[in-house]
Structures are given as structure tokens and as C-alpha cells.
Image: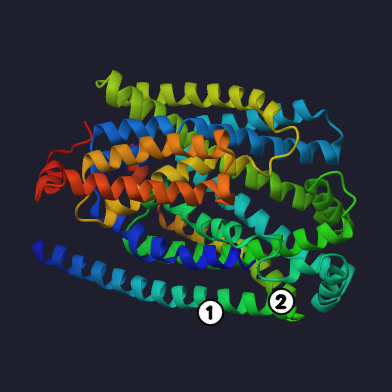
Amino acid sequence: MAERNEFLAKELTELERKKGKIAGYLALLVILIGLLLGFAFYKGMTALPIFLAIINILFGPVTLFFYFREVRKGIFKADQENE
Amino acid sequence: MFVYVIPTGLLRLPLAIFLGPKVRDRIPDWVITMPDLFEYLYDRKSKLAVAISMIPPVLYESALLTAGGQVIHYVTGVNIWVAMAVLGIIIVLYTSLSGMWGLAVTDLIQFAVMTVAAGFLAVGIVTAYGGLDEIWKSIAAVDPELLTPMGHNSPLEAFSWIIAAGALYANSQSYQRFGASKSGADVKVSYTLMLLFGMCFSAVMVLSGMVASVHFADAAAPSEGFWGLVFTVLPIGMRGLFVAALLAAVMSTVSADFLIDSTVIIHDIFKSFIKKNMTEQNVLIGTRIVIWCFGIGIVGATYFWQEGIDKAYYYIGGFQVAAFFIPLIFGLTYKKRTPLAGFLSVVLTVLFYFVWQFLLGAPFGIPTNVAAWIFSAIVYLIVSQLTYKPNSMEASEGNASGA
């Protein structure tokens, strides 16, 4: 049991580390997109509204899809059991 | 774009990467609300000061309700008071019955509606007015300053907008979500994603506003110009989607703030200071009663925003950010923080905000949030230097239990 708990703890730490790395890349992307948006707005680049339209149209439904996937995996189950 | 949207995205990165995860991982589970956080960082006096300061901004919800009611009125012709009352009742019903879980679900659905609507609006603008170079030419012909990085803002006004990025650092909804996250790593990923998307969504709103200000310059109010644009560029089905998107944004924000403010009254004030042995069942009933009282109250308070809501956040919500930001950031990062510094910084800055904004009328052209932050930082640092004793904060954290 102790070995299993140790194994699970290691897995969890590895997962946390991976998420931290992903967050780092996303932070770089935030900076990059911020600078690109500023440049595109200043220059009046034709592609900007299309880029914004694609991002906006996709982002919400994609987020909703992943959210429902987490719900099916049981993300609320722990809370409901505690209740 | 340059004084708010982009700086906001970039300046909030430390919250996403450092502070939010720190709050989630290192702060005890009994810290649920913003006042709880101040009790953890300082003492119960600070908790009470923050809890009381969080109540007046509920008036901002009436401004949002006004916006939602106006949209329903424009679209359907229904009497605006009836529209606001119906919208308010719907929000109160699902918030009081389903709590945080309901908020999480409805927020997601509302988010999806908002983003798709914004995307189609961007397409509609380009279809109706040509590519961005054509749009920029039409704006340059009418108001060329709109195309400059500063727009019509003075340097101080621009600075004021830039530091408004700090609003999320002192926003109780942020800490509500940190506490609800599985881990600090989840906070990092979700918040940076939110910042990324937020910039893209806000960029569409900025573009829409610029186009509306030029092509609907004769509108009686900016909001009418904006809706004129929406109804011009979007086909009928998409117009309904956009109306739903705005109502979704209103409902999402109002419901979250209702839940937070009712929790402040019942959990942070009533249970913490008046009736300490309140059962969880009674806390739940009390929270629901307060949500209903807020709902009725803000419908009446919409009277104050009949002339427009553009200054609502600045007047009502602004002081909360101005008063909480410095003690919150210093509390999480400054080793020499002291309870008295936290308490006096909050109380005196709230008073300073009202004096600077409403009695002095923001003199010398210095925006109130800028002046308030400077004042708050000075008070905090002076008091902490005068009252700091080594090891005193570590000892008091060990005793803090949220009782």
C-alpha cells in the first residue's frame, strides 16, 4: 500500500511538472500573440479579423468539448461523494 | 488595444504563473474567500475590513443588469424595467439553487456562446466594410487619432488603463477559481489559456467599437451605436446569437458576484463574527436568502445607470481594486508584512478613494486608481516598517485557523 501510494505520488508530481511546462509554453504564446496583435492592429493587416474570427469561433466549443470530457471522467464525482 | 487589451494580457501573466498557483498550493483549505485570505495573511480585523468593503461593489451588478435590460428592450421592445426584472430573477434563481456547480456549468455554456458570436461579428464586419485596410481608411477619414496607440488618452489616462490590469489580482472571482482548482499546475495552464483567449476576444470588441464609433457616430449613445453595428453586419440568426452572447456575459458575471458577495455576508461576516456555531445547512439557507435580497436590490439600483454604464466599473468596482491590490500583493510576497499594515492600507485607501474621486474630482488629472495605489503603497510600507517584528507573522499564521 505504501509502495502504491509512493508510486501514485511520483506520477502526480510528473503530471504537475508536465502541466507546468505546458503553462510555460502558453505564457510564451501569450507574449507572442500580444505582440503580433499589436503589430497587426497598428499596420491594419488584412489577415487580423480572419485570425480573430477563427480563434473565437473555435475556442469556445473546443473548451466546452474538453469540459464535458472532464465531467465524463468524473471531475465532479469527488465533490458529490463528499456531499 | 494598446493601453488595455495587450497590457492586460501581459501584466496578468505573473498572476497566472506565480501568484495563482501559490495561492492554490500553499494556502490552507479553510481559506475560501478573499476575506479569508486577508485573515490568513494578516488578522481578523483585516478580514472584517475587506468583507465590508466588498459589499458596495454589488451595485456594479445593477449596471450590468442595466446593460442586459437595454439589449432586451432594443431587440424586443419589452419595457426596460420588466426586462431587467426578468433577467435579474433568472440569475437569482439558478445562482441560489445551484451554487458554484451551476456557475461552472452555465459559465462554460455562456463562454461558448460569447466566443462564437464574437467570431461571427469579426467576419460580419469584414464582409460589410471590406478588409482591415478599408476599415482603417474609413476610420482615418473621421477620427485618425483612434488609430494611434494612445487613442484619445492622455499619458496618465493611458497609464491608468494599463494598471487596470491589476483588477484581476484583487478580484475575488480569481481567488474563488484558484481555490476550486485541482492544483497549482492546473491554475497555471487554465489561466494562461484564459489570458491568451481573452486578448483575442477583447480585440474583436475593440475592432467593433472602433467601427461603430465611425459608422454609427450619430447614435444617441455608444451602446446604441454598437448594437446598430451588430444588427447591420450580422444576419438575423447570428443577431440572436450575439444578443444571447451579451446576456450570457452579463449573467455569468452577475451570478458569480452574487455568490461571492452572499458568501462574504454569511460566511465572512455573519458566521465569522456574529454566530460562530452556524451549521452548514444554515449557511446555505442564509446564502440563498442574501442572493435573493441582492437580486431585488440591484433591480432597484438600475435606476442609477439610466444615463449609461460606461463609468460604472470605475466608480463602483474601482475602489475595491485600488484598496485591495497593494495589501494583497505585499501580503503574498513581502516578508515584512504586518497585520496593522494590511488593515490600515485597506481602510485608509477606501477613504482616500472616495475623497480623491468624489470630493476632489481626481485633481491634477491624476486618475483615482493611480493615486490610490500610490497612497496605499506608502501607507503599507511606512506602517509595516514601524510595526514589523521578526518571526511575528510566522507565529500568527500558525495560529490562524479561520475560526
Task: Tell me the residue that label 1 is attached to.
Answer: A32
Q: Residue B21: horizontal and vertical position, in percent?
A: 33, 60
Colouring convention used in this rendered image of the protein = rainbow
A33 horizontally vs B206: left or right: left
B58 horizontally vs A44: left or right: left
Is residue B201 placed above or below B222 in the rendered structure?
A: below
* Mark nearer the N terminus (2 vs 1): 1
Looking at the image, the residue that sits furthest to the top is: B275
Secondary structure of the residue carrying numbered label 2: helix
> Which amino acid lies under the numbered mark 2 shown in the image of this protein?
Leu
> Which amino acid lies under the numbered mark 1 shown in the image of this protein?
Leu
Q: Nearer the viewer, residue B366 or A41?
A: B366
Q: Nearer the viewer, residue B16 or B360?
A: B360
Q: Residue B10: horizontal and vertical position, in percent?
A: 49, 68
Secondary structure of the residue carrying numbered label 1: helix
Image quadrant in which the N terminus of chain B is located? bottom right
Task: Tell me the residue that label 2 is attached to.
Answer: A48
Q: Chain of mark 1?
A: A
Disc 1 packing (10 Å; few <14; some 14–19; many ≥20): some
Q: Residue at x 64, y 26 (%)?
A: B301
Q: Residue B33: horizontal and vertical position, in percent?
A: 36, 40
Q: Residue at x 28, y 23 (%)?
A: B273
Is residue B114 placed above or below B344 in the rendered structure?
A: below
In the rendered image, which quarter is residue B3 located in?
Answer: bottom right
Image quadrant in which the C terminus of chain B is located? top left
Disc 2 packing (10 Å; few <14; some 14–19; many ≥20): many
Whether residue B102 can be seen here: no
Check residue B109 in the rendering and tell me which mark sits there, or answer none. none
Q: Residue at x 55, y 50 (%)?
A: B367
Looking at the image, the residue that sits furthest to the front is: B364
B33 horizontally vs B7: left or right: left
